């Protein structure tokens, strides 16, 4: 990858983050009865979307570095593939269980805390399937791992608040930016 391609990736990811945060902000303003429609808040959403896109890019390059180091360390590629699925399953269970233990009030079921991971898992599956179709079948597991685990790691600040609006406003641009970067990568490194 050269500097021109990296600059394109950086700027286009900023745009994806801004647009997806703006869409999430409009959705929240139209569906939340406590919020009134405010253009200043929409501008704020654009800025936060750009900030979250930078966070997404840091996570993407951290994953690429981790993947490169581990693939060079393990002699068998299958071991890293199995480890990614194990870590994905642990992250899925932990994000449901730990949030339920920490935030659940009397009468709140653990299924309430399963909605976000299930949606994120579905998004990760769709992106992984698309990536495998665009490149090859071996891209499915790393894409699934990156889209689910790294998006959850990047979204920890919103998950700690236990506020659905904050979670939607942060996870939407993170997932969109992560999907954009992983689907674009093979075109940039030809």
Image (cartoon, rainbow, N blue to C red):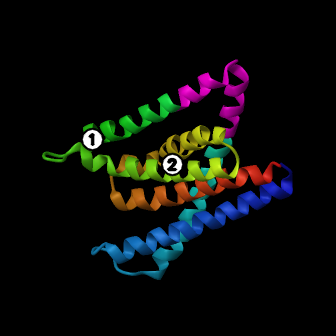
Q: Residues within 10 Å of mark 2 (few under 14, many from 20)?
A: some
Query: In percent of the image, x 81 and y 56: which residue is there?
Result: 5
**Percent x, y for residue 46?**
56, 70
Q: Residues within 10 Å of mark 1 (few under 14, many from 20)?
A: some
Residue 137 position by quadrant: top right
**What percent of the width, then of the height, locates residue 22?**
51, 71
In percent of width and height, residue 170 lies at 47, 57
Q: Judging from the image, what secondary structure is the residue with disc 1 in?
A: helix
Tell me the residue at 36%/50% (across/down): 161
Q: Residue furthest top?
A: 75
Residue that lies at the very extreme toward the left in this rendered image = 107
Question: Which numbered marker is on residue 125?
Answer: 2
The verdict on residue 69 being magenta is yes
Q: Which mark is residue 79?
A: none
Q: Secondary structure at mark 2?
A: helix
Q: Are marks 1 and 2 in contact (CB under 8 Å)?
A: no
Residue under the image location 47 percent in, 81 percent down: 39
**Within the image, what quadrant is residue 12 found in?**
bottom right
Q: Relative to 173, is 83 above or below?
A: above
**Which residue in the structure is indicated by mark 1?**
100
Q: Earlier in the sequence, mark 1 or mark 2?
A: 1
Q: Is residue 79 magenta?
A: yes
Q: Name the residue: 48% across, 28% down.
A: 86
Q: CA distance from mark 1 to mark 2?
A: 24 Å
Q: Reply above or below: 13 against 117.
A: below
Coordinates of residue 72 in the picture (x, y in percent): 73, 24
Say how many tags the image has: 2
- Which portion, as a residue range, is magenta? 63-84
Q: Is residue 96 above or below residue 181?
A: above
Front disc: 1 or 2? 2
Q: Main secondary structure of the magenta part?
A: helix
């Amino acid at each position: 990858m050269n500097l021109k391609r990296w600059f394109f990736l950086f700027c286009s990811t900023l745009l994806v983050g801004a647009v997806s945060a703006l869409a999430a902000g409009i959705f929240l303003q139209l569906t939340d009865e406590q919020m009134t429609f405010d253009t200043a808040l929409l501008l704020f959403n654009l800025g936060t979307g750009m900030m979250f896109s930078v966070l997404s890019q840091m996570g993407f390059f951290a994953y690429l570095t981790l993947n490169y180091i581990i693939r060079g360390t393990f002699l068998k590629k299958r071991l890293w593939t199995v480890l990614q699925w194990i870590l994905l399953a642990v992250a899925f269970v932990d994000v449901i269980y730990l949030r339920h233990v920490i935030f659940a009030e009397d009468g709140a079921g653990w299924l309430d805390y399963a909605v976000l991971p299930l949606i994120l898992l579905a998004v990760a599956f769709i992106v992984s399937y698309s990536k495998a179709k665009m490149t090859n079948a071996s891209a499915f597991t790393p894409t699934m791992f990156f889209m689910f685990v790294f998006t959850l790691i990047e979204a920890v600040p919103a998950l700690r608040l236990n506020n659905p609006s904050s979670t939607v406003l942060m996870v939407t641009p993170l997932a969109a930016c992560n999907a954009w970067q992983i689907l674009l990568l093979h075109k940039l490194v030809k």
